[in-house]
Amino acid sequence: MSQLEEQIQELFEGVASEDTERLVAEQLRSSAEARSLYSKHARLHAALDHRALGLESLTNPEPVIPFEELQRGQRKRIGWWIAAASAAAITLMAIVLQQTLMPNPHGPLQLQSSRGAVYHLSATVENSGIAEGSEIILSEGVLKLTFSSGVTSIVEAPAQFTYKDHKTLYLLHGRAWCHVPDTATGFTLESPDMDVVDLGTEFAVYSTPNKADECYVFDGEVQVKARYGERQQQILTAGNGLEASGLGRLKAIDMDHRKFLTALPDGPLHLHWNLDAPEGNVYYAQSNFSNLEPPALRFMPDGRQSNGLVQGKFGNALRFAQSGDFAFSAWPGIGGKEKRTIAFWTKMPTGEQMQSEMSLLGWGRRRHSENAQSCFLIYAKAEASEQFTFCLTLGEGRVLSDIPVQADTWAHVAIVYHPEHESAFQVYINGEASNVTYAGFNGLNTLIDHPLSSPLKIGDSLTQDIRSNKDIPIGTTLDELHIIHDALSQEQVRTLMLESH
């Protein structure tokens, strides 16, 4: 018996530890062979349960596991109009009002997109809308879905979902916020790990292949049902969150309003930290996503009272004076192969504070793994005569620029990623395009939802080794940080550089 089989057996016997549960869940997510093995043991376990009921259950012509246990029944909601035969005029009026004031519950899905959104439809168009059974892959931007039943949903990229019918949406992965009017109670949002049945509410679901699916309720309540394993279910009320594991268990999680948009934004996400006026040691960003709480950078000085504030290029700036100074946020960063622009002013140190490589900012899974392009980290590389060039590491692969910047001098740095360009990366120093070379680069796939992924950090070590400070940016100053979920042109980068203040 393999180790995986022993772990699965422990699960069915109810003696598995939390670590074992987590390991099995990861295997089930990543391996078809593991899922097949789990299914085999599930059937064997069910057969033994039925055997305990006696010979009659074994000779029953039905399958070992009854059909109703294998198939999830389709949810139905039937409304009945009752009118007295003698009240024909009232009945006619009701019909007219229903046709004129109420939406057709079986009409097509309507789509609206944010500026710059990129999506693909495996769909048929019906009456200027999307027909039932259509699949939508959203690679960039945000979509607003309007169901004929009156339900509205905001879906953020990257996402893939299927419009099953007027009362059901299947979210393979992505973030989806839903508002369900009273007339559409019973609307269901399905994901790989859970079904969420609306009971009159405003709720959201976050589904990702690397973590348990999450559900949050902002108003009203929903019924959450795990789809596999133990198939636990629970009524979730406003102000609460749940996650559903691949083993079919529900677990309470903290509420997080910041994860979801509730309206179409003006354009791609644009975060701007001017770093001028912290609240204590917290620096808040300005954001064009108005309904989301702006991400905060928290400065962590090394064993002293400090907010890192110094004179900047424009107003104030953030300086990492000692080894151990860094700033972190809860914002996960831009993931996958999505477009992005990171721009900032910086002044690099001189003399003894210079190091061969100095990490500046980044996010993602920084440890080397089977996915070698899993992080996104900008760093400065020391050159001769107290000069630096600015580079990017993706974990294994690197992107190198060739325009040197003098130490102790303000310089504007912008790194742009556009997967459709001949050269995927562009690096601009003081508005001028640098020649870009690649080392070990075979594509970008930033992991922001892996258990080992780090959110945005500034001044943190490239190696993530607490025993090493070889790349800590001691003496480095940053100002006017912009992170944009889009690929800016050189002209736009120059405009941003001049208008940073």
Image: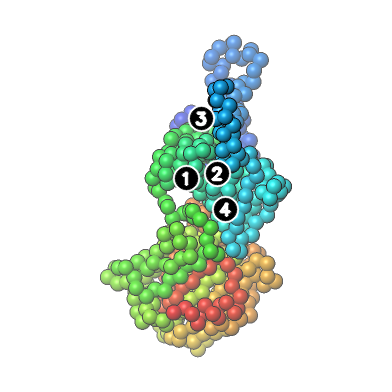
Residue at x-position 51% and y-position 74%: 343
Distance between mark 1 and mark 2 Cα atoms:
15 Å
User: Which corner quadrant of the image does residue 42 belong to?
Assistant: top right
First in residue order: circle 2 vs circle 4: 4
For the point 43% across and 86% down, the residue is 408
Residue picked out by circle 2 = 150
Whichever of labels 1 and 2 marks the residue nearer the N terminus, that label is 2
- Rendered location of residue 105, percent (x, y): 60, 39
The type of residue carrying mark 1 is Phe
Residue that mark 4 sits on? 144
Where is the C terminus found, in terms of image quarters?
Answer: bottom left
The type of residue carrying mark 3 is: Phe
| SS of the residue under disc 2 | loop
Q: Which residue is mark 1?
A: 203
Please state, as top left, top right, bottom left or bottom right, where the N terminus lies in the image. Answer: top right
**Residue 440 location, quadrant:** bottom right
CA–CA distance in space, label 2 to label 3: 43 Å
205 left or right of 32 in image? left
